[in-house]
Image: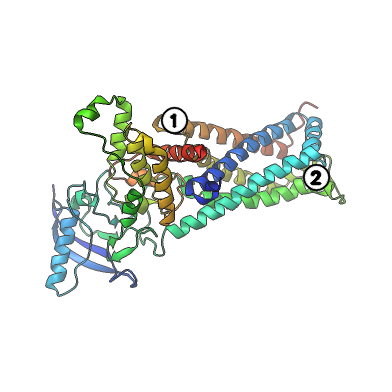
Amino acid sequence: MDKDINIKVKVWRQNGPKEKGRFETYELKNISQGSSFLEMLDILNEQLVNDGKIPVAFDHDCREGICGMCSLYINGHPHGPDGEITTCQLHMRSFDEGDTITIEPWRSAGFPIIKDLVVDRTAFEKIMQAGGYVSVNTGGIPDANAIPIPRDKAELAMDAAACIGCGACVAACKNGSAMLFVAAKVSQLALLPQGKPEAARRAKSMVAKMDELGFGNCTNIGACEVECPKNISISNIARLNREFLKAKLKD
Amino acid sequence: MSWLIKSSIGRKVIQSISGLFLILFLLFHMSMNVVLIFSHETYDFLANEILGANWWAIVGTLIIGLGVGVHIIYAIILTLQNWKARGRDRYASKSKTPVAWSSKNMFVLGVFIALFLIVHMYQMWYQMQFKDLFGMEGVRHDGAQLVVDVLSQTWVLIAYVVAFIALWFHLNHGFWSALHSVGWNNDIWMKRLKRLGYFVSTLIVLGFIVVAIAVHFGYSNLLA
């Protein structure tokens, strides 16, 4: 049964990208375990505003786990202690009476902090702009249905396409590597006939952009896969390595 | 071919290929050690062929040295780059993501193995090939006896076994990770490669440990 719990939250506060940050601890009383994690933060912010303080800035949008906007490193896990969900899908029943919850922003050189818990993830947009698309119009639904695609390929492409680009992989990685994200984006197109013609160019330019933006080198630890809210497999990283090496060897 | 050093995947390929090469070398080294248990004479013959002052022995040593050097240099480069990529501020809370211990500690394990390698090279290679090459005094041509002398000390045996265990953890992640980095993996092969890596690392390390313990307790040269 859901109860009302009293908790403490230890939140990273940072006024701006260049400011020095620090942790602030706030007490919250009678938080329903039925409320979502972000609702708890809303309650915290209401409390802060009523006290005449500046509310905590955090990213959120759809609050149903598909937009990829929410982030937060909660108690040592990107997207919190529950598996296969985003922070907005996390509920307070994952926590107990008297808990102190540590909330931090994603930490990586590729994702600089804007304010408090909000980080700049435009690096992912830049990687997508480098080649994460199909250049020519591939036609309407009837055309797509006319192209035979093996079921296993279609399934793998769909699994890779589940990536919402939230950045939890980078946040979880000890190397600050964006390989799982790039691997998913390269794979979802490389597996399908519509994406094939540009596969080599795509792999090369997306990896080049990823390196340029200061993300780390993948060492196959697999933390990304464990924390990914969409269960993207690191097999995609092997596929990206394959696509990239094939493209480079062909040059 | 500049992409090999300029791209992240290229640098990983260098680390993978050098690592896989060193695994092959370790397999050979382990097989060679096993000979010690059976016959000192055969061991000495082989050791003088490959650790003497012959041209093929020198070329072989240089190639292996190159493999080790490249592997260490790239381990340092990759680790420093990854350290930087993590950003200036670190997480205050310890990561709770469940991952294999060895996968997070490859560099630490590598440093440990490298330190062992310095001791090991001084105890064996320096006394044999190095002194032979530069005409120094006290060259050992009786490799088997040298191994017996060195391993008869208890601290050496303990240091060797500890280093072998570190090597086991290093190889356990290194084997499948190297193949993953060159693109040879998918959901089905992942299980196979991890199991094969487990087998290969256990085979190598068990061979080393068994020989070291056997020699320490005098169970070598059994066929003589």
Residue at the extreme bottom: A52
* In this rendering, position of residue B76 left or right of residue A194: right
Q: Chain of mark 2?
A: B
Which residue position holds label 2? B128
How many marks overall? 2
| Amino acid type of the residue tagged 2 in the rendering | Met
Choose the circle earlier in sequence order: 2 or 1.
Answer: 2
Q: Is residue A14 above or below residue B185?
A: below
Q: Amino acid at mark 1?
A: Trp
Q: Residues within 10 Å of mark 2 (few under 14, many from 20)?
A: many
Q: Secondary structure at mark 2?
A: helix
Picture quarter containing residue A203?
top left
Position of B214 with respect to A62 (left or right) is right
Measured in 3D between alpha carbons, the distance from the residue under mark 2 to the one under mark 1, in whole angstroms, is: 43 Å
- The image position of residue A201, as x and y in percent, is 41, 42
Secondary structure, mark 1, is helix
The image's mark for residue B189 is: 1
* Residue at the image point whose x is 82% and y is 49% from the top: B131
Q: Residue at x 61, y 46 (%)?
A: B163
Q: Are marks 2 and 1 on the same chain?
A: yes
Q: Is residue B112 visible?
A: no
In the picture, the quarter occupied by the C terminus of chain B is top right
Most foreground residue, A81 or A58: A58
- How is this picture coloured? rainbow
What chain does mark 1 sit on?
B
Q: Residue A174 at what x, y percent from top left?
A: 42, 53
Tell me what residue is drawn at x 62 percent, y 35 percent: B24
Q: Residue B21: tell me if it is visible.
A: yes
Residue B58: image x %, image y %? 77, 42
Query: Residue A224 placed where, x, y %?
Result: 37, 46
Q: Nearer the viewer, mark 2 or mark 1?
A: 1
